[in-house]
């Protein structure tokens, strides 16, 4: 947090005048898992955007594309991956054709610190 | 031009509310305040005010709705008594902390138990640390005048605090008296329009009201409330002065009665000041040098003004209409505060406390005369006495 | 024209709840809020009862709310927003403020709604304020550490209804608040869940446009209290719906309507076994409680079908 202010420098009554300033607060470092994106083709259904509890799905509103994650805030809950229909399809297939590696998910959740191991970064 | 009318204290207050024409009133009935909201409801029903009257299901919701409406930038009023105030408690503090300039007519009544509908000051004394400005009134006229001033005091940009205007349940709330009402336009001109700086309804500039505030800033917000209270001290005087100049009735923190050469002084608040005045006159007729000091502003507590007014007295008695149980001597709150104020200002005068009138028990001029006589004796001995429970049966 | 209820369109609208709040990873509360606010095109003003949502989104000096927002206390979200709405109506009527079709919304948790705030809510809707009250029901007092509320499901372990040697979790069936609110005969009452986002959004739209007081009860997972993995939030929420623990329906001007009927009504076990708070129910000596629970759910489901003319 920035320097703490004195009582004359802050609005009265506990009011916060800077709406949405929690973006300045990092919750990304809570993350034990990290969502990664882009193996399989994203169909831009925006289910992840719709269900992310942390408003952390980045979208390009012009191109109408999901572009990634706001890692400053994403807490790594994995909900985006769980609601992704591309993932669901791949997983279903994997179940059908036993043993098949879920090679290309749209969103994959990887343990923080193990990204390189998994072939990322 | 103002007009004289025979009105009860509650009707006077209801008329002040009509003339103030608040944007929102949220209130709930409770004796002895009820007739205020009833009368005001008639004004609403007859289209005499623009007020949105929120007929809440409890006092807790009354104060909650008031806080919401005030944050939304509305001019807001309410009224209650005793148990109603107690049920509001949590939000009474929040109203002050959120800096909502709500004006409340508080018709003083004894707190339960046992349940009782009559006057004492146990209700208002409980809210003394809540952050509200508290004005006391001897009669309906004063309650009326203070309601009008309260709007200006609370909304003053250097203050922004809620204000409670007290009067005694039944004794003045239900007594018909001559009340001089101002003209509607005079009231409107005096109070002006409310231009809130931080409205929740300013949709283009969204604000967050009432966040979670831990050790990093809670204390700073409390310090701001101190500043507001300190500012209120000056603002109350300024506004009383303006009121006096405009309408010819002057108010201060205190009102002195025959104090000039008084050896002993009784300090009282609300209607008992009227009764005490009679006692003073009778005793003066006997040649006794007695005076009365009436407290109008209880919060912010006018410690300096009290000390100054009392510095040449030889003995002082305080009339307390409530008990601060377990406090020093089980005395009344007015006494403990006054004694502390005098001690800190270096006024070393013998002082005694008289608790009286609990649950609406009458206090007769004769009893106040007894207080004066005992205080005169105290002036002789020069020794402070503890508390006396006036009028209680052994 | 109202924004089409399609994620592709909705994501183009400004985000009303900023990230950086401190709700736990995977918390259902902010999913509910985001979906509901995305469904409303008009300006909104919000009051929020004390509880996880309020606490985590406004830790001074930060706020996640990009809309006007007020927290007053725990039990008075409804009365607070009723005061705000009264102020708005008064100011507009007097020409002191421009009319803007503002939607007034009160949020409260199940504790703040079913329990301590029920009176204020009942009073506010009875008075007819134009407001939507939303209960995000996570089935316990989560913010104070998972204590039981009257919304806590039968048999659940909470910190004040612990699964002990003698008493196996909460002993009472939950209060049916949605029905209590329907009994107020207000224009709109809906029960919804974020796992059926379109249903939730459609209900939200109806609620804020019903021309009077509206109430919505929305199932909101708390992975801390329910004890499941953070990425299972919506799946488990949907199991609540598909087991008919949490039927999706609405009551519009007195008309009861089922808005979603599971293709196959799943046994309650399917929902219970996914949550740690019910683990003890699967011990042999407690299994009868699952049967009791199933019976209660069946009874209530049949009753609902009947009311909705689906029986
Ligand atoms: C009058 C009062 N009593 C108790 C509390 C303590 N308290 C704060 S939040 C809370 C529980 C909130 O539960 P719920 O409404 O279900 O919201 P959740 O935290 O589960 O989202 C309690 C008991 C309080 N703040 N005020
Ligand atoms: S992991 Fe959770 S917080 Fe992160 S982007 Fe996905 S849904 Fe949002
Ligand atoms: S305790 Fe539960 S309800 Fe509270 S923030 Fe965490 S997940 Fe959400
Ligand atoms: Mg809860």
Image: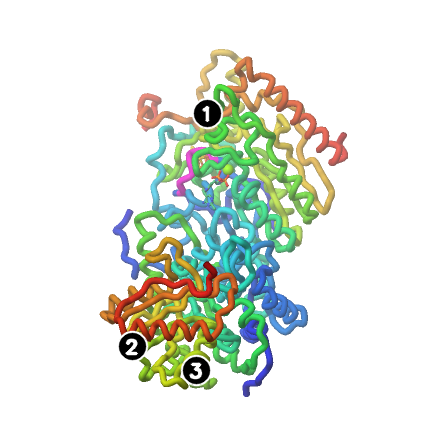
User: How far separated are the C-alphas under marks 2 and 3?
Assistant: 19 Å
Residue B313 picture location, percent across and down = 29, 77
- Could you say which is closer to the camera, residue B269 or residue B41? B269
Specify the farthest residue to the left: B346
Instruction: Point out the frontmost of discs 1 and 2.
Output: 2
Residue C101 picture location, percent across and down = 59, 58
**Which chain's residue wears label 3?**
B
> Which range of residues does the magenta coloring cover?
C21-27
> Mark 3 near ligand 1 (CB under 8 Å)?
no
Task: Tell me the number on the disc at residue B282.
Answer: 3
Q: What residue is shown at x 67% (from left), y 68% (from top)?
A: B45
Callout 2: 10 Å neighbours few (<14), some, many (20+)?
many
Q: What residue is shown at x 35% (from left), y 67% (from top)?
A: B301
The residue to which callout 2 is attached is: B313
Instruction: Point out the frontmost of discs 2 and 3.
Output: 3
- Could you say which is closer to the camera, residue C17 or residue B118? B118
Instruction: Point out the frontmost of discs 1 and 3.
Output: 3
Q: What residue is shown at x 36% (from left), y 67% (from top)?
A: B300
Task: Tell me the number on the disc at residue A105.
Answer: 1
Determine the secondary structure under disc 1. Answer: loop
User: How far separated are the C-alphas under marks 1 and 2?
Assistant: 89 Å
Task: Tell me the number on the disc at residue B122.
Answer: none
Q: Is residue B77 above or below residue B60?
A: below
């Amino acid at each position: 947090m920035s320097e703490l202010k004195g009582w004359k420098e802050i609005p009265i009554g506990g009011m916060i005048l800077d709406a949405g300033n929690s973006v300045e607060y990092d919750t990304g470092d809570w993350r034990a898992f990290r969502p990664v994106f882009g193996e399989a083709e994203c169909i831009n259904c925006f289910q992840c955007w719709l269900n992310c509890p942390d408003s952390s799905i980045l979208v390009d509103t012009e191109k109408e594309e999901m572009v990634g994650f706001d890692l400053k805030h994403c807490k790594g809950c994995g909900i985006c991956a769980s609601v992704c229909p591309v993932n669901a399809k791949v997983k279903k297939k994997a179940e059908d054709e036993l043993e098949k590696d879920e090679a290309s998910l749209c969103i994959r959740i990887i343990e923080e610190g193990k990204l390189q191991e998994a072939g990322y970064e | 031009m103002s007009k004289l009318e025979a009105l009860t204290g509650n009707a006077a207050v209801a008329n002040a509310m009509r003339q103030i024409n608040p944007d929102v009133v949220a209130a709930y009935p409770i004796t002895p305040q009820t007739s205020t909201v009833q009368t005001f409801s008639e004004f609403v029903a007859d289209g005499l005010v623009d007020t949105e009257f929120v007929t809440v299901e409890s006092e807790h919701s009354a104060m909650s709705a008031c806080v919401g409406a005030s944050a939304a930038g509305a001019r807001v009023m309410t009224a209650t008594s005793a148990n109603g105030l107690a049920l509001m408690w949590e939000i009474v503090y929040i109203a002050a902390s959120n800096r909502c300039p709500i004006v409340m007519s508080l018709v003083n009544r004894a707190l339960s138990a046992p349940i009782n509908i009559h006057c004492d000051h146990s209700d208002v004394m409980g809210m003394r640390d809540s952050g509200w400005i508290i004005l006391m009134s001897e009669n309906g006229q004063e309650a009326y005048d203070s309601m009008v001033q309260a709007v200006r005091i609370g909304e003053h940009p250097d203050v922004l605090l809620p204000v409670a205007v007290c009067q005694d349940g039944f004794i003045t709330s239900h007594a018909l008296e001559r009340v001089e009402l101002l003209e509607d336009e005079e009231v409107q001109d005096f109070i002006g329009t409310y231009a809130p700086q931080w409205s929740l309804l300013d949709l283009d500039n969204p604000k967050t009201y009432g966040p979670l505030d831990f050790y990093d800033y809670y204390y700073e917000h409390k310090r701001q409330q101190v500043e507001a209270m300190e500012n209120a001290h000056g603002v109350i005087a300024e506004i009383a002065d303006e009121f006096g100049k405009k309408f010819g009735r002057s108010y201060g923190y205190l009102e002195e009665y025959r104090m000039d050469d008084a050896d002993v002084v009784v300090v009282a608040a609300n209607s008992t000041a009227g009764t005490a005045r009679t006692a003073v006159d009778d005793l003066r007729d006997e040649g006794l040098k007695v005076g009365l000091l009436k407290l109008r502003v209880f919060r912010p507590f006018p410690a300096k003004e009290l000390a100054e007014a009392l510095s040449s007295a030889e003995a002082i008695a305080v009339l307390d209409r409530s008990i601060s149980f377990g406090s020093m001597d089980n005395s009344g709150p007015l006494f403990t505060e006054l004694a502390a104020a005098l001690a800190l200002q270096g006024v070393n005068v013998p002082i005694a406390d008289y608790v009286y009138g609990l649950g609406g028990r009458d206090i007769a001029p004769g009893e106040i005369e007894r207080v004066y006589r005992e205080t005169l004796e105290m002036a002789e001995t020069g020794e402070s006495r503890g508390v006396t429970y006036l009028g209680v049966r052994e | 024209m109202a924004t089409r209820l399609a994620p592709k369109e909705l994501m183009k609208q400004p985000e009303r709840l900023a990230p950086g709040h401190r709700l736990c990873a995977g918390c259902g509360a902010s999913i509910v809020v985001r979906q509901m606010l995305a469904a409303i095109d008009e300006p909104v003003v919000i009051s929020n009862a004390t509880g996880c949502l309020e606490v985590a989104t406004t830790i001074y000096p930060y706020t996640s709310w990009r809309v006007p927002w007020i927290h007053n206390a725990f039990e008075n979200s409804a009365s607070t927003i009723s005061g705000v709405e009264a102020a708005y109506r008064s100011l507009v009527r007097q020409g002191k403020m421009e009319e803007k079709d503002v939607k007034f919304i009160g949020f409260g948790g199940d504790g703040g709604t079913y329990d301590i705030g029920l009176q204020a809510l009942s009073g506010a809707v009875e008075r007819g304020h134009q407001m939507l009250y939303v209960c995000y029901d996570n089935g316990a007092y989560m913010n104070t550490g998972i204590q039981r509320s009257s919304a806590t499901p039968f048999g659940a372990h909470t910190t004040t209804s612990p699964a002990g040697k003698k008493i196996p979790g909460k002993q009472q069936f939950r209060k049916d608040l949605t029905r209590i609110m329907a009994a107020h005969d207000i224009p709109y009452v809906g029960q919804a869940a974020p796992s059926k986002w379109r249903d939730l959004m459609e209900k939200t739209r109806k609620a804020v446009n019903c021309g009077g007081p509206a109430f919505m009860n929305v199932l909101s997972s708390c992975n801390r209290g329910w004890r499941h993995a953070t990425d299972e939030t919506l799946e488990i929420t949907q199991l609540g719906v598909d087991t008919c623990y949490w039927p999706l329906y609405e009551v519009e001007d007195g008309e009861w309507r089922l808005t979603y009927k599971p293709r196959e009504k799943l046994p309650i076990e399917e929902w219970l076994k996914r949550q740690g708070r019910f683990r003890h129910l699967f011990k042999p000596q407690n299994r009868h409680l699952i049967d009791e629970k199933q019976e209660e759910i069946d009874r209530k489901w049949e009753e609902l079908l009947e009311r909705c003319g689906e029986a």
